[in-house]
Amino acid sequence: MDDQREALLALSLLCEPGNRLVSAELTRRDAVDTLQWLLAGRDDPAGAVARERLAGRAPADLVAETLETAHTCRARPITPLDDEWPSQVADLAELFDETDRYTGPPLCLWVRGRANLAEVVARSVAMVGARTCTAYGRYAATELAYGLADRDWTVLSGGAYGIDAASHRGALAAGGPTVCVLAGGIDHVYPSAHDQLFEQVTETGLLISEWPPGASPRRYRFLVRNRVIAALSLGTVVVEAGLRSGARYTARMAAELDRPVMVVPGPITSPASAGVHQLARGPAPVRLVTRAAEIIEDLGPVGPDPAPAPSPPSRPRDRLSPDAARILDSVPRRSAALPDRIAAQAGVPVEEARRILPGLAGERLVEDLDGRYRLTTEVTPA
């Protein structure tokens, strides 16, 4: 194995993902020198954690042990030195949050599935939301994900209950790829009830994680994971979210990365949509979406032509000329009237009314009762 790649793997095993201190060092040194720097008796938390995890072993031995474990669970590591690496996660280096030391770019991603990581996320949309979603939210997530996958877009989410699971299932139903970003080792199915779902994901898409096999999901790791969801995708859609929600954190990360943030509006009476509506109020620019075509349009140049605006159902009245519409509006509903009276009501010449009324009768918009006219029963006044 290449020394630099082995050093990157070792660094990813010895530090928690997103460690900004290590990420900063990697901008000044190569991976081998950064590993030596980390293990050179440093007194800071990063050095102490690294030595504890190493437990007297050589870094190469730790890497070899982890690769063997990964092989048994059909996982592979991908580093920035590999062709499969998604280069867009490097944008995380631009984030700065003095309250969070774990927003840096990943050093390694553990992947399970046949798809090529860089290729499958090149046209991807993150869909996130509440775990305890409503039936409305589940329906919306499923429909949007199906529509995206049906248009050859990858749906990316976190594999949790609720909106995440509905998004994955919607994409799978369309036969498209979906990517599930985990907050623990790739061999830890969490939640356990999603074992079958995760197996289906690997058939056309990927399971990925920054944590090596054997790492258990922990509460704080879900927020760390969410920054990768935001960075991997071209935009983030929040379907449902409470006022306190990891989905809102993902949306915030996406906004800071200059990725489009979109929200699905919900009932104003639903607590599950309260966080969504707060996102829509700013301060970051947010777009409302209701269809997959609108999501694709909002992703910018990578999308096709703008989504056509939804239009009301077509009616025969819609095809009428302005004069014909005025005449139709002047035809009485109950008692039939002569053309001259209808023309006077419409403000058009009698000849025009006599010319147009038979055509309206042919369209079954009016009834011709021996030269007198009235509306047919199925015509509703405009």
Image (cartoon, rainbow, N blue to C red):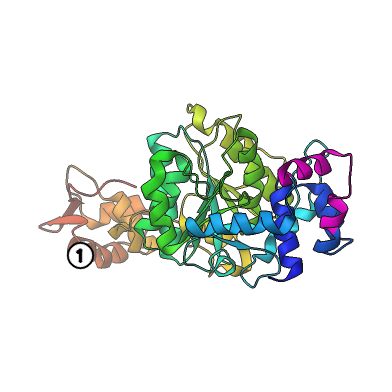
Q: Name the residue under label 1.
A: 358
In the displayed structure image, the side of residue 345 where residue 99 appears, left or right: right
Residue 125 visible in the current orientation: no
**Residue sitting nearer the eye, 58 or 354:** 58
Q: Is mark 1 on a helix, strand or loop?
A: helix
**Majority secondary structure of the magenta segment?**
helix
User: What residue lies at 76% left-to-right and 67% top-to-bottom?
Assistant: 4
Q: Which of the two residues, 352 or 215, is positioned nearer the viewer here?
A: 215
Q: In which quarter of the image is the N terminus?
A: bottom right
Q: Which residue is outermost to the front? A: 56
How many numbered discs? 1
In this view of the protein, which residue sits in the foreground, 370 or 116? 116
Magenta stretch, residue numbers: 34-55
Q: Where is residue 268 in the image (x, y as percent from the top left)?
A: 50, 30
53 magenta-colored: yes
Most extreme residue toward the left is 370
The structure residue drawn at horizontal position 19% and vertical position 48%, both measured from the top left corner, is 378
Q: x and y percent of residue 334 in the render?
A: 18, 42
Q: Is residue 156 above or below residue 332?
A: below
**Residue 82: % across, % down:** 66, 70
Which amino acid type corresponds to the residue marked 1 in the rendered image? Answer: Pro
Q: Position of residue 37 (x, y in %)?
A: 88, 54
